[in-house]
Image: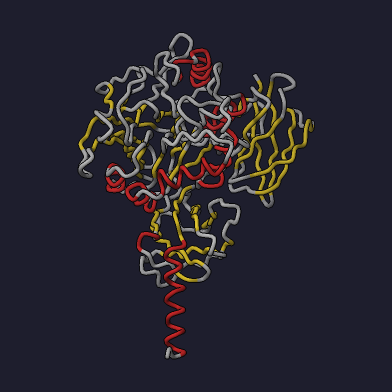
Amino acid sequence: MITRCALLAILLWSTALRAQDSLHVFWSGALTPHTLEVRCLASATVDSVRLLVDTDPAFPSPLPTNAVPRDTTGAFTSLRLKGLQPGTTYHYRFALDGTADTNAFHRGRFTTPQEGPFSFRFVAGSCNSWSDHPVWWAMLARDPLFLLEIGDLHYANPNSLDTNVHQQAYVDQVLTRRPAADLLRHAPIAYVWDDHDFCGNGSDATFIGRTSAAQAYRRSVPHYALHHPVSIHQAFTIGRVRFILSDLRSAKDATHMMDGFQRTWLQSELLYARDHGLVACWVSPLTWNSIGYPENWGCQPAEREALANFLRDAPIPDLFILSGDAHMLAIDSGSNTDFSTGANNPHDYPVFQAAAIAQGGSYKGGTFDQGGHFPNPDLYHGQFGEVQVDDDGTQVCITFKGWRTDSMSTAITAVDSFTFCRTPVDLSSISETRINDPSPCTWWTAPEVAVYLKEASGEGQADLVDASGRLLQRTAVSWRDGVAVLRLGDAPSAGCYFLHLRAEGLSATQRLCAP
């Protein structure tokens, strides 16, 4: 006969055991000095999920966090951590329906970046068809702050009207594979898609799975603020580097790489970096300094030239480019990256081509002066990039390192490397209230304008005034992480304008210049 105590013990044991089996997969992203997002997929038997977070891996005194109802629509459950301390390593695990999950493989770790000047390293790569490859463990061994995934996270090619088909590809092809899952348990991800993880080989805005891919990304992937119902372009700052991730699939077609909305956003982000003392890192999933291959910037020379002219004329002095898609490691110092009219930009923009994580080799054009290009020898080798940022508070020095491994171990060999330094200047403290003050301007060259109000979230207001102070337009603003995009229409005439920005308890003025 089972005693009452024994029965209670059995019930407690079975509850704990069920908790171990109820968490399917998880990953983290949207890392900042104070916040992180964790996404998890739990079984239908779970009603609520809570994160247990501590600086001690034994979890003696977890931070107070709220339980979140499990998403019942089939999407990943989103758990957001706030109030974290900069420059701190945290450990986390899950509590399912109040029961702590003690499975060692259900634990995560991350380190918050410091605020301001800060030295760090991250790993970067694209084109992964084999998440069981030890190259994922090789990336983990570099102890990166985060993983920057530049597209083709998987090769499921999920061109479907069914959102679940796109979502399941993340689960089956990445998150349930031990090497990839191990890296993603210890390194938050920043990720933008390319064709094979969007809707298939060569996919663009005409493919039927476009909207489903966008929905699956939002349901599954931890990400920074998004500003469009479909496109997943996004930006974030770590230390004194502004990362600007372009989506070159959801609006791409036979005539252009990105639409006007994203182009305006990209230019505004580059100007923001310039005016706030940040080095811009532009993540272009398709190769920039390439020839006329259909799947890179070489297939749209006029659009590339216009963007290059903007970089020259703005001017944007401090920029480097990370690319994927071509299955090779390659570095250019910036000597072959100027496609402006007359090729007369005085600033060099180093390019790091970082691929393929696990795929056969390919070359899709471009000149690279740091040793040439190095395609994967075959499917069984793995390659990835590492970017080291060294910031002494004045100068920012950036080192690209290309690494290769094989299918038998995590041992790596160096393929190529390059170091360059920049000295960005913060202009944001310059007064923006005087008409003739040479302060930073956001160029009003398109109907949409990106605006910034640090730490603003929720609803707010923007007043557009001319140089005489006359109110021209009052617009409601939906802030997310201090960023919003306003539709102002075309500028009434050339000259200087101002946006008075407001959110709860916050205000700022942003200067607009219409050419």
Find residue 130 and report its horizontal and vertical position in percent. Answer: 34, 39
Furthest residue toward top: 342
Find residue 302 and report its horizontal and vertical position in percent. Answer: 52, 13
Whether residue 167 can be seen here: yes
Which is more toward the observer, 489 or 347? 489
Find residue 419 and report its horizontal and vertical position in percent. Answer: 29, 31
Identity of the residue drawn at 62% across and 47% down? 456
Identity of the residue drawn at 70% across and 38% down? 500
| In the image, residue 2 above or below residue 57 | below
Q: Is residue 144 left or right of residue 305?
A: left
Whether residue 282 can be seen here: no
Q: Is residue 242 left or right of residue 103?
A: right
Find residue 82 and report its horizontal and vertical position in percent. Answer: 53, 57
Which is more toward the observer, 179 or 397? 179
Which of the image's four quarters has the N terminus? bottom left
Which of the image's four quarters has the C terminus? top right
